[in-house]
Image (cartoon, rainbow, N blue to C red):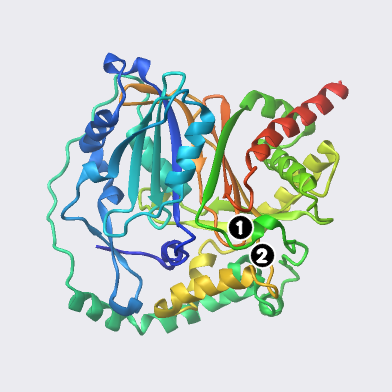
Amino acid sequence: MRQLSSLDTQFLAIEDGRRTGHVGALAVYDPSTAPGGIMDCGTMVALLRQRMHLLPPLRWRLMEVPFGVDYPYWVDDEGFDLSYHVRESAIPSPGSDEQLAELISRLHGQPLDRAHPLWEMYVISGLADGNVAVYTKIHHAVIDGVSGAEITGLLMDLSPEGRDIPPAEMAATRSAPRQIERWGRAVVGLPRYPLRALRSAPSALPNLEDTTLSSVPGVGQLGRVANRLSNVARRTGERRSRTSLPAPKTSFNGRVSPSRRFVFGRLDLDRVKEVKNAHGATVNDVVVAICAGAVRRWLVDHDELPNSPLVAQIPVSVRTEEQAGTYGNRVLMLAAPLHTNVADPVERLEATAGGMREMKDRHRALPANLLIDFNHFIPPALFSRAARATFALATSRVGRPTWNVVVSNVPGPQIPLYCGGARLVAHYPVSVITDGLGLNITVMSYDGHLDVGIIADRRQMPDVATVMDGLEQSLTELERAVLSDR
C-alpha cells in the first residue's frame, strides 16, 4: 500500500464531467520486423503479461479514504484483469492520419474508471501504410513525464529479438485495508498536516507567484511581501518575481468542454539543430520559438493577438537519481514568456532564448518540493474543492489565467526501438488540458525527429490542426533567415 502525495492527488482533484487527469501517447509501429509480420492485441497482452512484474503501477488500484479526510492510497488490484485494459480498435478505409487523430480525440476525452487500475491501451489497425498504432493512456496521478518514460523503456527493446526478462520474485501479498482501518490511519495522521504546513511555510510563501494561486487577486502581492521578508532574513538582495508575466486572456483560456481535439505531426531534428547552431540557441529555445510562431498565426487569424506575450507553462522534472523508479509526480510548473507578440522570427527566437535563460535561473532558485509544500496548506478534506475553486476563479471575470498554454519538449532516444519485435516509427505525446489552460503542445524527440502532439478543447479550437501547420511554417521561416545570413 502506497499513499499518494498532495501533488499526485491534485491530478485526481481536477476531474469532473468536463476535465480528465490522464496523459497518453500514440505510438506507431512497423509490424514488418515483428515475428510473422504481426503486431496485434494478442502481441501486446503477451508482452505485458511477461513484463507485468516490472511494472507495478499498472496493477495499482485507487483506494479512497472515508470522507476524504486524508490522501488516497494505491493498493494492488487483487482482481486485476489484463484483458480489461488492453483493447482492440480499428479505423475504416482509407486509414488516414486525420481519422487516427479523430479516434484518439474521442478516446482521450473519456475518463478512466477508478474501480480499476487507471490505465488503458488500444491497439489500432487499419492505417493506410500498414503500420499499427498503439494508444495508451494512464492517469497523471500515477506518473509524470520521467516516470512515464521509465514505463515505456521497460516495454521497449533495442532489437527486434527482444531481451531476457528477469523472472518475477515471489512477494508476500496483503489484502487491501478495510474501511475502518483506513479511517483509523487518517485520524491518527491528522496532526501531521498542521506541522507540515508550518515546515513548508518558509519555502512556499515567498514563491506563491509560481503556483496556481497566483491567479487569485492579492496572492501575488502576498508572495512578493513574503519574498522580501525572506530576503531580509537571509540578508540578501535577491529578488524573485513573476510580475513581468501577466497572462492575457484568449479564447483557449476559458472553461473547457468534455470534448477534445488532437492532432499530431513531426519535424526533422536536423533542421532544428541547424537553426540552433546558426543562432547560438538550444534545441529547446528553437522548439519554444516555433511554438510561439504557430500560436501567433492562430491568434492573428482569429483577431485575438495580445500586445504582450502569452505565458507558457513549462513542466520541469525535479526527480533525483535516488527517486528513479518511484513513480508518482516530481515536477515544477514554471512560467516563461511565449513571444507571440514578436513578428520577426529571428527576434522571436532571440527573445525566447532570453526568456528561457531567465526561467532556468528561476528554476535554480526555487525549492524542488514547492508544489508539494504549497499543497500542505490545504487540508486533505478540502483539497478537491480548493483545486476546483482555483481553476474556476482563473476563468472567471475577476480572475485571470496563470498560464495560457503548455509547451513541453521531452528529449528521447535517438536510436530505433522495438516493441514485440515491431519497430517504433513515431511516438506522439497526448497530454492534458484543463480550465484556463485549453491548449497543450508537447514535443518528444526520437530517432532524428521531433514527434509533436497537440491537444485542445474542441469547442475553443476546432481548427487546432492549423497550429500544427504553423510549426512547419515557423521552422521554415527560421531556416530562410539562416540562409539569408550566409
Viewport quadrant of the N terminus: bottom left
SS state under label 1: loop
Assess disc 2: are there few (<14), some (14-19) or many (≥20) residues with their C-alpha within 10 Å of its C-alpha. Answer: many
139 or 250, which lies in front?
A: 250
Lateral position of residue 347 relative to residue 245, left or right: right
Lateral position of residue 376 relative to residue 451, left or right: left
Lateral position of residue 13 relative to residue 40, left or right: right
Does residue 268 sit above or below 184 in this rendering? above
Separation of disc 2 and disc 1 at Cα?
Answer: 8 Å
Q: Can you see residue 361?
A: no
Q: Residue at x 19, y 79 (%)?
A: 180
Q: Residue at x 57, y 59 (%)?
A: 256
Assess disc 1: are there few (<14), some (14-19) or many (≥20) residues with their C-alpha within 10 Å of its C-alpha. Answer: many
Q: Residue furthest front?
A: 93
**Could you say which disc has been placed on residue 401 in the image?**
2
Does residue 34 sit above or below 247 in this rendering? above
Residue 86 location, quadrant: top left
Residue 390: percent from left, percent from top:
57, 72
Q: Look at the numbered discs 2 and 1 and tell me whether their residues touch, using CB distance below 8 Å.
A: yes
323 or 117, which lies in front?
A: 117
SS state under label 2: loop
Residue type at mark 2 is Pro
Residue type at mark 1 is Leu
178 or 186, which lies in front?
A: 178
**Could you say which disc has been placed on residue 121 in the image?**
none
347 or 117, which lies in front?
A: 117
Which residue bears the numbered disc 1?
437
Q: Earlier in the sequence, mark 2 or mark 1?
A: 2
Q: Can you see residue 299?
A: yes
